[in-house]
Image (cartoon, rainbow, N blue to C red):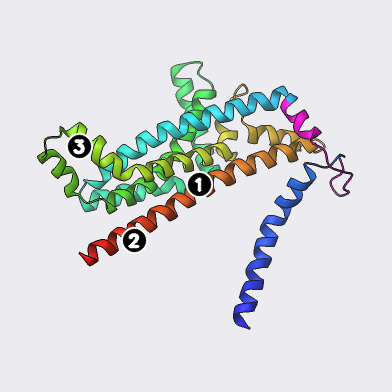
Amino acid sequence: MKKFLSKVYVAFIFLFLYAPIAVLVVFSFNNSKSRSVWHGFTMKWYAELFRDEAIISAFGTTLLVSLLAAVIATLIGTMAAIGFKYMRKTPRTVLMQVNNIPMLNPEIVTGVSLMLLFVYVGRVLGGVELSFGTLLLAHITFNVPYVILNVMPKLKQMDSHLYEAALDLGCKPAQAFFKVVLHEILPGIVSGFIMAFTLSFDDFVISYFTSGAKSQTLSIIIYAMTRKRISPKINALSTIMFVVVFVLLLIVNLRKSKDNTTTKKKQKGMVKL
């Protein structure tokens, strides 16, 4: 009986969380502006969505910021994780705690802090305003900690003697890094990149405070559209964003599951030996 009730409880939680999204997806195909009555299937809201220049421009900005922020944050986060790996315990612990601060901070605190910093630096430099550059820097800032947390476990799982063995076998330090270390931690790097891209693509609060008038992201455009009468185009746009984020998260989770299975098989093989 307890198991049955627990399953019912979990089912209600998922229903509460995902029913609104399901309604949004269904009514993005509704042949009417009504948000409560079904008038037939149509794709016209998706067609109108792709004819909206403001949304297309915002999508281009969002995609560009997300890709650049994910790539740069992945590079910085990977180098930082490798540096943390070979530090002494005390400074590594301190730096990891500092690394966790952006993730524990409310987004509005991070957004306002970065905005004040950019405004101050802009005044010091003279005439520099919030723009695409400040938006990109803000996204890189909050993405780096997530990349580090994805790469660090792979570094801990890696046999530290592999790098030394590669050097002994004639590899130069750079060759040993790219052929051995990078190969071992690549799944963590890919997971960090996908997570950084997803978080950047989906962000609203930090983008709202650090973007300029000419660098509007999709989330900001959606927020502006909701101030007026909600258009079914928002349903269509939200559906597309949901599908994109869902697919990316599915890839991350499948990759992690595959990596865990591979690690367990290796550990069993080592035990047998």
Name the residue carrying label 1: 251
Residue 49 falls within the magenta-colored stretch = yes
Q: Element under label 1?
A: helix
How far apart are the two marked residues, 1 and 2, measured between alpha carbons? Answer: 20 Å
Front-most of 126 and 249?
249
Magenta residues span 33-50
Q: x%, y% of residue 1?
A: 63, 83
So how many labels did they put on this image? 3
User: For residue 164, what is the image quadrant?
Assistant: top left
What amino acid does circle 3 point to? Ala
Q: Earlier in the sequence, mark 1 or mark 2?
A: 1
* Mark sitting earlier along the chain (2/3): 3
Q: Residues within 10 Å of mark 1 (few under 14, many from 20)?
A: some
* Residue 217 seen in the current view: yes
Residue position marked by numbered label 3 in the rendering: 176
What is the number of the mark on residue 264?
2
Q: Are marks 1 and 2 in contact (CB under 8 Å)?
A: no
Residue at left offset 26%, top offset 62%: 269
Above or below, 131 relative to 193: above
Residue 84 place in picture, x, y as percent? 27, 45
Q: Nearer the viewer, mark 2 or mark 3?
A: 2
Q: Label 3 near label 1: C-beta < 8 Å?
A: no
Question: Viewed as shown, does residue 84 lie left or right of 188?
Answer: left
Q: Are marks 2 and 3 in contact (CB under 8 Å)?
A: no
Q: Is residue 22 magenta?
A: no
Q: Amino acid type of disc 1?
A: Ile
Instruction: Report the front residue among 58 and 212.
Output: 58
Up the image or down, 175 lies above or below 27; here it is above
Tell me the distance, in whole angstroms, between the alpha carbons under discs 2 and 3.
Answer: 25 Å
Q: Amino acid at mark 2?
A: Lys
Along the polypeptide, which appears first: circle 1 or circle 3? Answer: 3
Q: Which residue is located at x 64 percent, y 33 percent? A: 218
